[in-house]
Every structure is written in structure tokens, then in C-alpha cells.
Image (cartoon, rainbow, N blue to C red):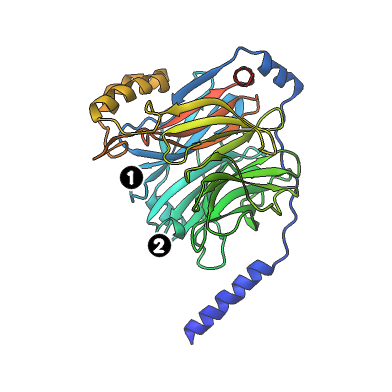
Amino acid sequence: MKGVSLGAACLAFGLAWHSHPSAPLAAFQVFALSATSGGTQLNATPSYSSRFASSDLEDFVHAAAVSPLPGGDLMAVWFAGSREGAADVQIRGARYSAASGEWGNERVLATRDSTETAINKHIRKLGNPVIALAPNGRLWLFYVSVSVGGWAGSAINAAYSDDFGDSWSTPRQLVTTPFLNISTLVRGTPVFHTDGSIGLPVYHEFLGKFAEYLYLDSEGAVKDKFRISRGNNSLQPSIVPLSPTRAVALLRYAGDGPHHVLASDTNDAGKTWSKPRAVDPNNPNSSLAAVASPDHGLLVALNNLTDGRYRLSLYGTNSEMTLWQTVVELDQSPDPEGNPFSPEVYREIIGDKFMRSSGLQRRSSLGQYLKHLDQRVCSAFGCEFEYEYPYFIRSQDGTYHLVYSWNNSFVKHVSFNEAWLKEQMQ
């Protein structure tokens, strides 16, 4: 009898959830350069630089995100631990100082135990943090936790900071599904609407693999959600507003057959989305990231490969995504097919890459890093290069910032200006 009552209650809740009237959506908050700042950027000296945002030398590091802060500073977040899915994984973060041009030491923002205490629920593992600064100055952090099973049993937790990351609210878990509140994950950059509401690109991995647009009010309460894709072949939407009502979503392809990036469009600020269609770049079931460019198109960072993640490329495309142009290869294996190297050869190559990528502050750590080339990059078949999980933003002054996982060892931060971009695309 209790089982019947519980089943009836779940069915009633599910029907109520899916039949409630949709919340009205405000227009997208569309970023635009002023004429002054745009001209300054284009007339500036071309600038492109890289450095490591993370500093730990031994842990597995993955799934970074970054947000602008006032004055040109940044904050990045990621997860790190002995391996992906381990109980010791923590959500970590660091601050970038525009004045010094360097990242500070990383700090722990959330652990399995601290999340468990906050939401009063057993937690097995953590992952996929994203961070974004709202127009009202509130800094939001969303991250995934799992109580039972694998990533398909995920839920999303939210915390905020009103002092730009110095202190954080107690995390709370978002209720995003009517049945057990499982299988909602986040990865893409949050989107803001003109009334301060938040659009969170989310996806599901239980009984299907599909993307949705989760709509939150300015206080982070779930108001609604809207399906972007269906079926069993798409994950991790990256959403880019192009006008007050139009946005495009680029999706990671997770199905069978030819692996290409999928694209979907909305013309009503995220309420309805077109059926996803394949666009030119390959996608070897890997995360990608996009941001609006000044010519009303997009910049997209992705692994344009049929298999593996040994090359991360930056592309420019028009808003219809019918024309694609390579801007630069951000990072790649010296082997054109991504084949593994012997540990001896690999140490020499990655040592050189470390020095080129690290930034001045991390260079003294090379020797210690090379002592810890372990399962993050090496196996019985040799040692491989892997560049993945990009996350893209454009700050208020027009500078682009991209973070991604560098050989499972560091979060790499790349920044460039409009003058450099124009030079590459001529």
C-alpha cells in the first residue's frame, strides 16, 4: 500500500511538473563592446599569452571554468583529486590578478564532506563546477554531486559570493527533476537575462543523453526548464546569445555514427529550441566551448578529431555555422595521429611544453612536476597528450579568456585581444 501511495505521489508530482505553465523569459543580456573599447582593442598591439591557473603538481585536474571580476581580475574553478570520480575530489579555485598578470594559489571551495553537511544528504563524489558573475555583482558557483551510482545520478548544487569569491554562501541543491532529483549535470557557461534571471545549460545521462536550458530567477530558484535536444546522443550544451532573443547552442555529440558537433537555435530567449543539426567540425564525444565574436559570429574551442583529444583548436564561424575558419591550434601532440610516446621521450617534450605554457610564476616547478608523470598521462601503452574541456568567456574590456584541462595535470589559461584575433583571421 505504501508503495502504491508513493508511486501515485511521484506520478502526480511528475504530471504537475510537466503540465505547469511555462515561466515568461526576459530577453538575453547581450554583451556588446562600446565604440571606444572596441576601437581601443582593435588598435592595440596584438596580444596572446598563456599561463597555468592551477598550482598543485600531483592531482588529476579537470573541467575548469572562469569568470571575469571587476578591474580585469578573474576567478577560475575546477575539480581535482586522485582521479575523476574519486571520493577525495575537491572543487578548487584561484584568483587572477590583472595587476601582476599571475594566478594566486589555489584554494578549496567545496569537498564531499562539506557538501554532504550543507545539503544533509550522502555524497559519493563531486565534479563539473561552473562560475559566472551576474550583472548585479553576485558571483555564482554551480557544481555537480552524486549520491548514488555514477554521473547519471547527479544533481546540481548552487552557492554564491557577494564579495567576488572571498567568502561563499552555504551550498544548496537545486531541484531539477520530479523523480528523485537525479541526472542533471552542468558544464556550460551560465547565461544571464535582462531581469537578472539565470539560464543554466544542463544535460542528462539517465535513460537518455540530452540537453536542456534550466531557468533560474535572480536568487537562484528554479523557475522552469526547456528541452534543447532529445534522444541519446547529445551532452554539455554551450550557449551563446547573439541578440536579445536569439542564441545558439553547440552540443557535444555522444551517439553512434559520424561524430560531428550539433547545433540548435532559439529565437524566443531560450524557451523553444530547433531540432539539433550536425555542423562541420568533428566531435569525438568531447566537451566544447563557444563565445560571441565582434562580427556577430562565434569563436569555438574544440577537439576537431574523429578520435582522441590530443589537439585542441580554436575556430571562427558565422552565426549560421555554415563557414568555419581555423584561428589557431591551441595545443596539440607532436604526433599528428596522437600516438603515445615512451616515458623518456615524453618527459623531454612535455617539459618544453610546460615551460612554454606555465607563465613565469610556475616555471620553477618543472622539476617537481616531472617527478609525478603518472596515470594522468601514462599507461602501459606509453604517455599521451590530452587537451580538453575548454570554457570560454569575453570580459568587459573585450579580452577573451579560455581555460582548459592540460594533460590532466593543470588548468591552462589562454588570453588574447581583438587585435590578435583580427591578425589571425586575415
The image quadrant of residue 341 is top left
Q: Are marks 2 and 1 in contact (CB under 8 Å)?
A: no
Residue 103 visible in rendering:
no
Residue at point 57%, 77% (across, down): 9
Between 214 and 290, the one lying in front of the other is 290
Disc 2 crowd rating (10 Å Cα; few below 14, some 14-19, many 20+) is some
Between 120 and 194, the one lying in front of the other is 194
Q: Decide if residue 267 is on the left or right side of residue 91.
A: right
Residue at point 43%, 28% (across, down): 332
Quadrant location, the C terminus:
top right
- Asked if 328 appears above or below 210 in the picture, the reply is above
Q: Decide if residue 262 is on the left or right side of residue 297.
A: left
The residue tagged 2 is 148
The image quadrant of residue 348 is top left
Count of numbered badges drawn on the protein: 2
Amino acid on which the number 2 mark rests in the picture: Val
The span from disc 2 to disc 1 (Cα, nearest Å) is 18 Å
Between 401 and 132, the one lying in front of the other is 401
Q: Residue furthest front?
A: 257
Between 278 and 121, the one lying in front of the other is 278
The residue tagged 1 is 83
Residue 87 placement (x, y as % from top left): 33, 51
Residue 108 placement (x, y as % from top left): 41, 40
SS under mark 2: loop
SS under mark 1: loop
Amino acid on which the number 1 mark rests in the picture: Arg
